[in-house]
Amino acid sequence: MSTPIPANTALIEERSRKFGAAEEGGIVRCDACPVLCRIRPGRAGACSRYANQDGLLVRVDPVVLLDRAVEEGLPLVPFARGEWDGRLLEPGRTFVTGVGAGTTYPDYKPAPLIVSAEHNGVDTVTVVTEGIFSYCGVKVKIDTDRHLGPETAAVRVGGEQVGHVTTAEYGSQMLSLGGVRHLTGGSKKEGNVTCETLLKLCGGGPVEMSIEGGHTVLVQAGRTPVVDGRPEERMRVGCGSATIGIFAKQWLGHVDEVIVVDDHITGVLTEHQAGRVLGMRPAGIRVRGRKSTPGRYFQVANPGLGWGGTDITDPLAIIQKIDEGAAWPGMRLLLTSTTGEDALYCVLDEALRPVPTDMPPEVALVVARIGENCEPSLCTVLFMAGAGGSLRAGVTENPILLTRSVASGETRVTMGGAPVYHWPGGGITVMVDVLRLPKNAFGYVPTPAIVAPMEFTLPTALYERLGGHAGEIVSIGDVLRNVAPDARIEDWGATNPWPFGKGL
Ligand code: SF4
């Protein structure tokens, strides 16, 4: 990579003087990850995140500062890049994120920025860093009842396995991608493709993947999944049994039987408790599959891209038999999927054969209501990583105290300002919705591993008790004076809780 290289902050340049080892010919050795690139003047290292600027090792991307809007009624302070005079950003509503901050590798180094600020009368510290995560991956939730592939099936990108199908959730198919085994335990290509896939997904980009024994799916955080080239529109309203329960009363008087086709639990109205409570006459239609409880059937067909996530395209194929002693000519039968996208209305003829016919408006209204109650089908990408390792040494010389403090809730963990879910139990294992981070928050190193921002916020007194690097603390005022002119300033995400809120 050649010049121009964007300048980074004075603070980071200062740190580079400490840690970037200059060699002959102005070459700088970057030790921000185990690759240890030797970087010529005016060039960047293998990950494009660090560069040699006039003999100094600099982090190429600007630090991201988040500016929290003032209370209602007051105008936002305008910020004009290049014209910053060091006074426009308010320290009390600025959060310094780990995006662009740099890492602590080889980890005995204090975090790149340890920022003090007063909030609600409490002296606080935010330890700001970027973590290099070999133990990381993404959990992908795809809102569709269509069968994407068997559970545990390999998920491939460019022919390389990057993860697998995991247990489905209510109305959603789930993928588990990345993880240390695909990043480091297979071939070099597998590791690189996995890293690239994670980086794209975390950055909000699209990735097309194929599932062994299943289908292709285009995944992008916050967007509609595309299965075999067809965009999914609706997330099902519920399983077949739930759909029966929700709409039973609305069908009463307009149909004599309803079958809601679903790969997991197909519902049959008059047999179902909902139909019984409403006093509906048993219709005598037995569907295929294994009866679980009255009106609830498992395994009515194979999984697929047809009705309700089954391979059924002719819904009448689901009927195993019609009981002559119970059914009657003229009986009105509705078959529908759990999204209402597929529906068929029939009336039984003299021979008790279902004959498709026009759907009465009252019945069509309820089918439309199923659709109305379906949420848009989306992909959700959660980044999951373990920060329980050496990154902690950049926060404190006694890492176990940090782990305990995070576990007890005294220390708040954020990623790019976004709240994380911290897994109970050992370590600092967290999950975060990638769409709640600032743009371009993730990077990579060619080991391969994903680089992600991380911030630990806690009272200063507690930080000192944890054995934190107290000598490295800089005030938010100094950070704003030195960092803000070259920083990327973004608005605080309105849905993210302010880390300095009550209870800190
Ligand atoms: S890959 Fe990036 S972080 Fe690692 S040594 Fe090279 S420039 Fe530094």
Image (cartoon, rainbow, N blue to C red):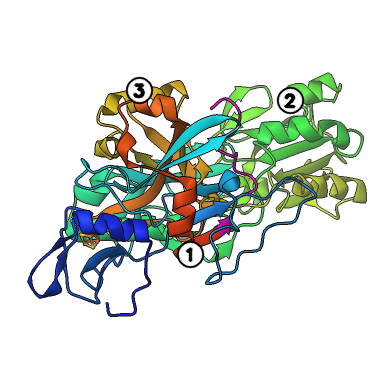
For label 3, the residue is 465
In this view, the residue in front, 115 or 156, is 115
In the image, what residue occupies the spot 41% across and 61% down?
Answer: 200
Report the mark closest to the observer, 1 or 2: 1
Are the residues flagged by discs 1 and 2 in contact, CB closer than 8 Å?
Answer: no
Q: Kindly state the secondary structure of the residue where label 2 is placed.
A: loop
Q: Is residue 218 visible?
A: no
Say if 17 sits above or below 172 in the image. below
Q: Earlier in the sequence, mark 3 or mark 2?
A: 2
- Residue range in magenta is 490-504
Q: CA distance from mark 1 to mark 3?
A: 33 Å
Please name the residue shown 35% across and 23% down the image. Answer: 465
| Number of other residues with Cα within 10 Å of mark 2, as a class: few under 14, some 14 to 19, many 20 or more | many
**Residue at screen point 19% across, 51% down:** 186
Q: Which residue is tagged 2?
A: 271
Q: Which residue is mark 1?
A: 485
